[in-house]
Amino acid sequence: MEYVNPEGLRLDGRRPMEMRQLRAEIGVVSKADGSAVFEMGNTKVIAAVYGPREVRCEYSMANFSTGDRMRKPKGDRRSTEISLVIRQTMEACILTNLMPRSQIDIFVQVLQADGGTRSACINAATLALADAGIPMCDLVTSCSAGYLNGTPLLDLNYVEDSAGGPDVTVGILPKAMLTKSEVDLPIGLYFLFQLAKSSKLAFSLLFDLYNNVVLLVDGF
Amino acid sequence: MLEQKEKPEQYHPALRPRRPSTLNSSQQSPHATHWWRCASQAQLQPSRRRCLLPPFWRPKAPKSKRYGSSARLHCPRAPPAFCIGSVVREHYLRDDIYCGAPFCKVCDVAAARLGSSTSTIIIVDTNVVLHQIDLLENPAIDDVVVLSVVLEEVKNKNLSVYNRLRALCSNSQRRFFVFSNEYHKDTYVKIESGETPNDRNDRAIRVAAQWYQNHLGSAVKVLLITNDRENKKKAIQDGIPAETVESYVRSLGQPALLDLIVQPPSEDVTMEDAEDLRPSKRKTIYPEHKPMSEITSGLHRGIYHQGKLRVNRYNPFEAYVGSESIGDEITVYGRANMNRAFDGDIVAVELLPQDRWQEEKSLAIANDEEEEEEDDVHLAPSSADDAPRVTNILQAGEKDATPSRPSGRVIGIIKRNWHSYCGSLDPMPMPAGEGGIAHALFVSKDRRIPKIRIQTRQLGNLLDKRIIVAVDSWDRLSRHPSGHYVVLIENDIDARPFSSQVLACLPPLPWSVSAEDIANPIRQDLRHLRVFSVDPPGCKDIDDALHCTLLPSGNFEVGVHIADVTNFVHPGTPLDDEAAQRGTSVYLVERRIDMLPKPLTEDICSLRSDVERLTFSVIWLVFFSGQAVDQSVLAVRIRLMDPLTTDLRNMNALAKKFQIDTETHDPLDIDGIQAQQKMLEPLIQTATAVGLCLDVTSSKALADSLDQAVGDDPYFNKLIRILATRCMTQAVYFCSGDLSPPEFFHYGLAAPVYTHFTSPIRRYADVIVHRLLAASLGICKLPDVFQDRPRLTGVADNLNYRHKNAQMASRASVELHTLIYFRKRPTDTEARILKIRSNGFIVFVPKYGIEGPVYLTSRGQKGGGEWIIDEQQQKIKKANGKVSYGVLETVRIHMEVKEPQPNRPKLELTLI
């Protein structure tokens, strides 16, 4: 299948290095200490943070988030894995040494999945943490990238994600420290670097968005 | 959820005192000006579908007990196939899609493809592309805007046309521009309620045409070409100039172009009436093809069998369909049973009842003249005629014959393999009116292809000429498929000169080894060695050379030097693309069609004498006993010299020590395919007939027993080897990731893995191996394509295709020269019998390397006539017992060129 046509357009009309439309909103769950909704195109994730207590994370997908509505048992392997990924990513940037013997709960739910749910979850969790006022060394920005038809593509949607090409989810602290990188197929180091390099573009975009959302709300 | 995008979120209790802030990143992003997202996605995409439950899945009367509670009664669980699903996709509209006209003031003209001084821009609709692709390929048609909606529709309907259109769009010589109207903010069209996707697409084409006209203003005329009456009417209503293909081509004033226009099928019928010569014309000649849904379900249930139809080279009325589902070949006899299928089509076949299976005829060699007679028998309206005739044969022939090979008939064609065919027109009197439309029958050079009916306005030009014809359609009412005349190249070989972009990639001439190359630490300097080539003196594209030096230790250093083509052909350049496309050089008699441009093949990469060249070299240390001990692969630069006799003597002495060539074991790309014992059956049959025992348990055992198969004359062994290679499948190129290691092997090579890298000038496969070699030696980075398996597989497939075509072309070229040679001089010569069939045998003439059938019986006769033929024992005896022949025996034959049908001369072999 042709994922990038010779005119350089992807199936949904984006160019390879363009992200989907981003939208973020914080303070969406009133009872939580911090919360955020994060959208990348049709992927939509809500995150709520309670704490500081000890760091904990839970991930789930709403039944209605995918194309075919199905009941999924809670705590399946996939969810556990993604919870772990988000937890580890967040632990890397939360200044846990400032909050000894405490717990932070992060609840992330995918409301609508259209590829790139992991990155959207990390982005939403970051915003929710910021909203809750948890001390962090930096804000994590995350984005996926893949390699299809011989072209590196940024921010894969569901169709591109399920195409079977190699893809990588990268989480980066804007102070240029890689906190997380997951690859789902064996790919050459050269391509990994190429993908990581291309996803850099996304991070400045995301960070701008964070700044706007967080700063505006908190009135800085 | 999606439709409510702009409303507050429902799950948001909004009880928090804080003001939620919403920000759209696109307002800040550098791409912001480029895209919009449509406000309501649900309406936007035609891909959002709801498939409703079919009526029979609605709950019926509540009498069923299965549904337990009444609550569930109203929603029984539908099977997964009928789940309600909705697909929501994003669709970004942009403002950075440009019109492609170089004179446009608003757009970015960097990628502009249209002519700078054009007065008319043509926009074509989908059906025009699908049917008139031959016309579009003619250089007279230019300045065409291809809309993405058209591309998409063409892709869904016919992939091969799509590929041709894509090739046109990327061809720098042509002015075809792809306009992504589906992603442009002003030309995107939403489907309206009650509108079919077809109508929507037609409207999108009109909107795009309108946009072009408004965008480019009055400087140019934007012309919509459509054969759809409704579309044309609406376009003209909207003020868009629109024309049909025919009227546009007429306006160009080139009558030859009119021949390229494919007539729509409806006109076809009326035309037939006018032409009508035979009273039975309007009768249905062929049974209808079954609809696709029926075929699919039939295949599932095992009633039908799917496979590729292969027409017998010697008898075009007989075809085989290799079917996996019954594990055997199904034989299809006669055009009626073949039901309009061409050689190479993927067809669905239904088995005939067993009493109608035929055995005897399958082994016959059909004669050319049989055609008309066969036509009458097999093309009769009802195939019921067949049955009695068959039983007759069985009675007349062997009574105990129990047909073992299943016969069948084609009930549907899953995939057509139509392409263009080379041949000439059946001779016919010139029609009275000069320049009018004439209908003619085209006879293909390939006997497996039926006659094709074409219509032309230039009959006088085409008669007695080699022409190329493409097939358009074959309906049930016509005996022959209809096609149109095109000009193309047989065997799909690109003999055109290289384009200017390709030539631009070449280094400037005169070329010599640069100081940079000399300083390059990767390259080793071997200019002190005496390197020589062993190609004949006239050879211009020399891609390998040797050296052989006696070392002080008494051993030899032997080097093989291969031209370093990849140093000049860089991946991703137009030169590389062109070479990958051509795949191989084609060698014809007295002519060569190059894969790479002449400056490379004959100068820069050619290892001629007394010049310095860059090469890849393999160097062995060889003991005098012939045992190679050390080997190294290097990138070097060398100077070539004329060989000294001592070098050649040394080489010769060493060559005698090597029994088999074992040096090629570079484990990179590999040739090969699995062998099956079954394939060797014909060989074993022949071998037993001449009392030879062959061991076919492994390729090594076979090779050994072939070595031992020495008969009483020197040619015997060679013939057995020819037969053995016939049985093997052709070795192919493949990407080593595509197959598992056991599948790599090829019977013919007594080595586990094999590749070649010795001719990068004329084989693209060797260029690939060179790149891998360079990367593994650390000379250069591995090109991207090697990480992309589908693309590499595509390259390998193309190489196989080109290789096969090149072989066929050189064979055809040899055939042609044979005909020219024997036309003037009928010859008597010796020949060897290769195979015995029911009405003759196939001989091989060692002196000329020619193979052909010898008929023992005239065409009317079914049996052997005065000859008694035993196919099982592969023996022929004259009825009076005086003369007898066995397989591989020598016969004397007479060779003469005859022309039974005009323009189809052939070499006829007769027994003396």
Image: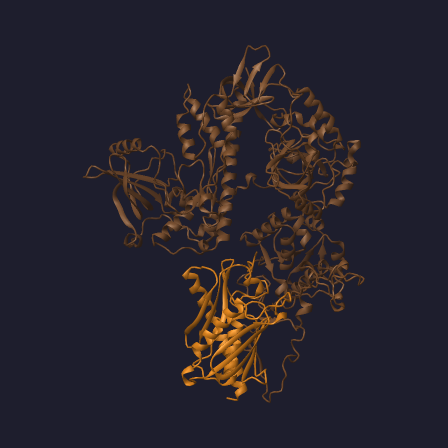
Image location (x, y in percent) of residue A129: 50, 81
Looking at the figure, which quarter contains the N terminus of chain A? Answer: bottom right
User: A144 or B12, which is in the foreground?
Assistant: B12
**Is B510 situated left or right of B480 in this image?**
left
Q: Is residue B155 something one can see in this rendering? A: yes
Image side of residue B826 versus residue B404, left or right: left
Q: Nearer the viewer, residue B870 or B106?
A: B870
Q: Residue at x 64, y 36 (%)?
A: B461
On screen, residue B757 above or below B35: above
Q: Position of residue B606 (x, y in %)?
A: 37, 42
Tell me the shade of chain A.
orange
**Percent x, y for residue A180?**
44, 71
Q: Is residue A187 placed above or below B901 in the rendered structure?
A: below
How many tags in the picture? 0
Locate residue B547, reporting x and y percent: 28, 39
Above or below — where is A218 with respect to A40? below
Q: Color of chain B here? A: brown
Which colour assignment does the render follow? Answer: by chain
Q: Is residue B451 visible?
A: no
Farthest-out residue, left: B552
